[in-house]
Every structure is written in C-alpha cells, then in structure tokens.
Amino acid sequence: MKRIAILGSTGSIGKSTLKIVEAFPDRCSVATLAAGINVELAFEQARRWHPKIVSLASEEAADRLHDKLKKVGLGHAIDIAHGSPGTVKVATYPDADFVVSAIVGVAGLEATYEAVKAGKTVGVANKECLVTAGDLIVAEAHKQAKPLLPIDSEHNAIHQCLRGGRRDEVHRIWLTASGGPFLHTPRPQFANITVEQALNHPTWKMGKRITIDSATLMNKGFEVIEACRLFDMPASQVGVLVHPQSTIHSMVEFVDGSLLAQLSVTDMQLPILYALTYPERIQSDLRFPVSELRQLDFSPPDNEKFPCLRLAYEAVEAGGAKTIALNAADEVAVAAFLDGAIGFDDIPATIESVLRETPALKPESIDQVLDMDADARRRARYLIQEAGSATDRAHPAGRHK
Amino acid sequence: MKRIAILGSTGSIGKSTLKIVEAFPDRCSVATLAAGINVELAFEQARRWHPKIVSLASEEAADRLHDKLKKVGLGHAIDIAHGSPGTVKVATYPDADFVVSAIVGVAGLEATYEAVKAGKTVGVANKECLVTAGDLIVAEAHKQAKPLLPIDSEHNAIHQCLRGGRRDEVHRIWLTASGGPFLHTPRPQFANITVEQALNHPTWKMGKRITIDSATLMNKGFEVIEACRLFDMPASQVGVLVHPQSTIHSMVEFVDGSLLAQLSVTDMQLPILYALTYPERIQSDLRFPVSELRQLDFSPPDNEKFPCLRLAYEAVEAGGAKTIALNAADEVAVAAFLDGAIGFDDIPATIESVLRETPALKPESIDQVLDMDADARRRARYLIQEAGSATDRAHPAGRHK
C-alpha cells in the first residue's frame, strides 16, 4: 500500500493521480494534499479522501477550506495549512511514502527537495524541479538511495526502456516530440503566429504555458535538460526526434545498436500508474489499440524554426544558473506572448538575451535557485518592457494592435 | 570468454556468428563446428578458427575435409566427425559453453536437444527446433536452469522487450511481419503467383524455403509457435502485426497498457551478438540511423489471403504432433512449389489436408518427433502426387507447363 502525498492535487496530474487511487484502492491511499487556490475542488477532494493535511497556497483560501470542512464535520479531522511551509508539511508528512510532485512552476521546488531529503520516493511531474534544481534534487535522491520516478510520458517511457540494459550500455536517449502546431508552418510566417494558433496543440490537451512551450519546442528543450539530469547523461547523448502521432513516447538506443521504444495511449494516468506501482506493473484498462496502428511518422527537428531547442542544449551544457534562467525567461516571455505584449518569435529572442546575460554559476541551495530564478525573471521583464517602449516609440499605435 | 559450438557454421547464421567472433576476439572463441557438405568453406573455417572438432553431414565430405586439413598440417589437431553422431559430438563438446543451433530443418534437432541436456546455453536460430520439439527442448532447458536465447530478429526483440517487466505482467506479444511480397496482391491473383515472384522478398535476403514461407506468412506462423513455446504464452496472447519496413522487430504489451518495441537495422549479427553477450550489451557498429527514420507502417494480417497463419494458430493450439506436421507438410509443399509441381495456393491447401489427417498426439522424445515428421512428409508427398495425377488425368498437358 502506497500512502501518497500529492503536491498539486487540483491540477491535471493531481486529478489523474486521484483517479488511479480510486481505481486501485488496495494499492494506494491518499496521505496528504497540497493545492493552489481552488478551494471548491480541494474541499471535494478532502471530503472524498480524508487526507491528514491539506495545504493551500494562501491563508485566505486555507481559511475558506477550513470553514467548509467544519460544516461537514471534518474541521478537526483534517489539518489545514498554507503557503510554502504548508506545502513542505504535506510533502514531508511522516506517514506518506510516495510524493507526487505536480505543482506547476518553482512553487513546488522547496517541498519537492524536502520530500527527497526526507527519504520519500518522489514521482516528478513538475518540469521546473529538474530544469532549475535538478542537480541538487538528483544528488539528494542518490544520497537517500531513493528513486526519482518520472511522471511525464517521455521520461517515463525512457525509464521503461532503460530496463532493457545497464546504464553504461546506453548509447543515446531519444525524446520524441509531437512537433507542435507549427511543424509544417514555413519559417517566414512565424512572426505572425497568433495566440489562438499557438494554443491549438495537435495531440495533448494541456495548460496554456506548456501548450505554448510545445509550440516553440521549448518544452522539448526542458525535457532534454530533465533527461540529462534524471538519467545522468550528457546533452550530446540526448537526441530529439519529431513524431507527430506521439505514439512512441521516447526511445533508448543501446551500445549494441538495439533501440527500445515505449508506446501507449496518450493518457497521463499511465505514467502515474507506472510510477506508483514500480517496480511492478498492474493491470489497467489503458489499452493501446495495437491492431488499429497504421502509420507512425518521424523527422529531425528544425533548429532554424525552433531556436528554443538549441537554447536548451546550450543552457544544459553550461549548467546550473543557465537552465534556471532558461525556465524563468521562458515563463515570462510566454506570459507576455499570451498577453499580446510580444510576438511568437520574440519568445526565443527574449530567452536568448537573458541567457547571454546570465553568468555560468552553479546553485548550491534551493534558496540560491530561487534567487537566480527571480533575477532572470526581472531581466526578462525588463527586456520585454524595453523592447515594448522602443516599439511604441517607433510605432505609436503599438505593434500588436 | 564464451567458447562456442556452431551447428550450421557454413550457413548464413553460422557465417554471421563467425563475424561476431572475429570482431570480439576477447569475448568469444570457436570451440567446435558442424556443417553440411560445403567442404571448401568448412576447410577455410577450420583453418582460420582451429576448432577442436568439425563434423560434416556425410562421411565422404568428412574424408575430403580431413585430406585437405592434412595438407596444411592440421590433420591431427582437429577431430573430424560426420552425420548425426558427429553433430551431437560438436553440440555436447565439454569445453563449449554456448551452442548456436542454426542447422536448417530437423537435422539439428537431436544435437540441439542433447546440447540443452548437457547444460549448454543454447542460442536458437533453427526454427524447426521449437516448432517441432519446442515442448521437449524448453522443458529440458527449464530442468537445466539454462536460458534458451532466440537468435532471430523477432524473438530476440521480444526477449529484449520482456526485460521491461515480469513474465506474468505480459498482456500480449506482438510479432511484426514484413507482409512478404504479396501484401498488396489481390486475393484472386494468388493462384497465379510464380516462383520468381515469391522469391522476391522485400526486406530480408534469405534461403529459398524461408523466403517462400515469408510470402505465405507461414514463417510468421512458425514464429507464433516459437513465441508460445519460448515465452510460455498461449497462442491467444501472441498477435501478429504487418509492418513492411521491418524496423520494429517485435513488441511486448504489458498489463498496464505500455508496449515496449525493439528497433534496429535488419542484420542478423545483432541478435547473435545479443545472445552471445547476454545479459550484457557490448558496443557494436550496427547502428540504426535514427535521424533518418521517416515512416513506419502497420496493418493487421489478412487471414483470407494468408491461411497459413491461421493454420499455425490451429496447430499450436492442438499442440505436439500438429506443429510437427505443419512444419513437415510446409517443407514438402514449398519444395513442390519451387519445383513447379503445385501452385502457390496449393501450399496452404496441402498443409491443411495433412493437418486434418494428423492425430493430436504429444511426442515424448526426439525419436517420436522424427517419426511424426517422417509420417507427415509421406502424407504431404502422397497428397501432392495424388493431386498431380488427378490434374494430369483432367488436363493431360499438365497444369504447370
């Protein structure tokens, strides 16, 4: 029986995790939950699962949840917490043995690190953990001799394929990429890509930032960085292959020339189930219709059209602060794009400028990671404002009207 | 260091095995060799590898080899044997620890069984071993607690994919099939397929019988039987998927919904290397050009066009004597087709008739396997002659002139 702490219980991964708990009540139970400000859903989850602690992002949200729980007689049964200390409490709860780290952004960083430090097995769904603090978290997991289990389709696929040989028998890891909605869009049209077009992802339904990150291939860049850290591989041994159907979730090429690939339906429940039951596999109804398989397409990624991928390789090779800046600058730039403040092409341009200004330092603590993250965000915002003012001066009507 | 006995050293698998030994002299060496009647090549191999024993099919061939070896001063260094006892001697040579079983047809059956019984690790490249005597050989390997390692691309792929989970976590095995040269030929044209057309295989260059067996999909049927026996799976859990590029060599579907697939170049050296070095993988130059991967196609097999596949499923479900008869009748029918005595469509028809007349017995020994094999061959020849006479009576000019 796995007793699970879910960081990000009201998000997509959190909800899928609870579906798994629902389906396999003899295998897993809910220990604690942490969420943002969705009080309604957190309340429903608390009532359904009776966790020992629920932590929300703000004190106000926590108070509202407490009131609602009191009304149904659960005011004393469930400990309510909030903010960063609350999330850490949820993540390190002594009776939890598996932590699902699925809080989007750097907000989940400290709690994830503390969970690893507390000797929990951590399922990593939060991209930022490994992109910004991967070296620290992986080193701590090694020290604790506890696995970090990837809960995203690509790294989970790699984890499965790696079972086919020893780590030193791996020649290369191949991440597959859907290619996003602009796979076939000619380069000259990239400057005019609209928010609506960029949000229209061909295979996965996801949040806004990750959808834009998929359109720029920055998401794949982040995954390259995650793969390097999770599987201790240099970037030169991590390749990307565009595969629009997202049926092969990733591949591992061994030194003898054999490749193993993992195929499945595109449902996040599958990697979650894998992580929760590893090293076992248990029967699920997430069947891939093999007999209906018809065509799988592949192509190399176009680095001209998608400079974000190149930037990610450069950042991970430089290490530490550069990957923190990559993530921070991207988040700011994507938000600006979604707000109409900058164009699609300006996303990589902003990131590249921020990276250029970022010194190649190595963070020694989560606090330093957060400082470097804040610095990079400031620089990115400044660059965007500067460019906006310059544009306003040149074209008083504004460039995105 | 693996000391290898090669049964079938002058055939395609035997030659590929020797290439591996050549490439990895610190990993493997040649202990003994058995071949057919290719005295020239056996002589070259003996001179190059200095095996302890060389056995050839006939006494006459063995004598010629002995004379040639005497002339180069190796008359005393190498023990020369012949016939079945010679092959068994090669297979059970005390100093050999790995036996490559690659003698085509039932000729290698006894020696392979004796090798397993003598506690050797056996690499099985010979299809007939598992199709005709699989139950006996697998039971003996279990008793000896020694692995049977498949040396053909499909079962080797499955062996690799099975590393991704426990045996009881397998939902289904998926053998891929190139589909052969008649994948897109309309059913009504099957009766007029010529020998030349049938010998034109799209992806693999192989011997004549296996090429015809690939054209009828009987080869895939044999592989279904091999998979059932090698991996202890019921036929209902072994599926076939047509995949013309032969890039994915086979797949394993696990109970949780994940599939693992193995991809590589189509070169038999790869499964041989895998078997010889298992459980390790060693660096080879058999690299698959991943970046050049473009398109993989799949479709379900057409059981109407390829009745041999259905016959194989029926035979393995009935077990024992039926799979022996399947193989024997197929070999006779394919030879008759190559001789122009019967049409392409008559191959499955002949096999089906022989199967219908075969009692569902279970052989208890290799001798019984050989008896059942001889019986089925007699029945197949009789049926073909009968049909030929009937055709001659009806059309005195003959049907295949």
Image: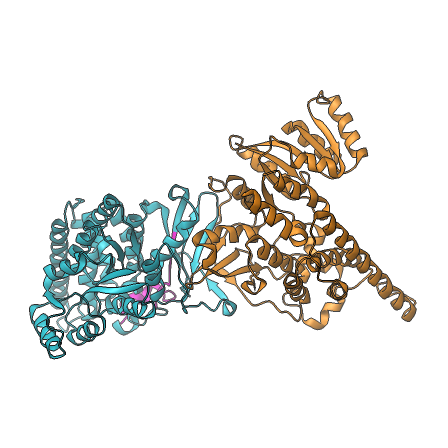
Chain colours: A cyan, B orange
Q: Identify whether B116 is placed above or below A301.
A: above
Residue at position x 63%, y 67% from top?
Answer: B184
Q: Count all numbered tags in the image, as a single digit.
A: 0
Query: Is residue A175 at all visible to an observer of this figure?
Result: no
Image height of A69 relative to A249, above or below: below
Left or right: A69, with A168 as reference point: left
Query: In the rendered view, would you say B121 is above or below B392?
Result: above
The residue furthest top is B73
Of B84 and A83, nearer the camera is B84
Q: Is residue B143 above or below residue A337?
A: above
Q: What quarter of the picture does the N terminus of chain A occupy?
A: bottom left
Q: Please identify the residue farthest to the bottom as the structure is shown.
A: A71
Tell me where residue A112 appears, x and y as whole percent.
19, 55
Closer to the camera in the image, A335 or B41: B41
- Kindly identify the residue that appears in the image at 80 percent across and 34 percent down: B59
Based on the displayed image, in which of its 4 quarters is residue A387 positioned?
bottom left
Q: Could you say which quadrant of the image residue B55 lies in?
A: top right
In which image quadrant can residue A354 be found? bottom left
Q: Specify the quadrant that holds the C terminus of chain A.
A: bottom left
Q: Give the left or right position of residue B223, taking residue A119 as reference.
A: right
Q: Is residue B190 visible?
A: yes
Q: Is residue A181 magenta?
A: yes
Q: Which residues are magenta?
A: A174-194
Nearer to me, A77 or B161: A77
Q: Position of residue B19 (x, y in %)?
A: 59, 37
Nearer-the-camera pick, B10 or A44: A44
* Residue A42 place in picture, x, y as percent: 18, 72
Left or right relative to B88: residue A4: left
Q: Position of residue B85 (x, y in %)?
A: 74, 36
Q: Is residue B375 magenta?
A: no
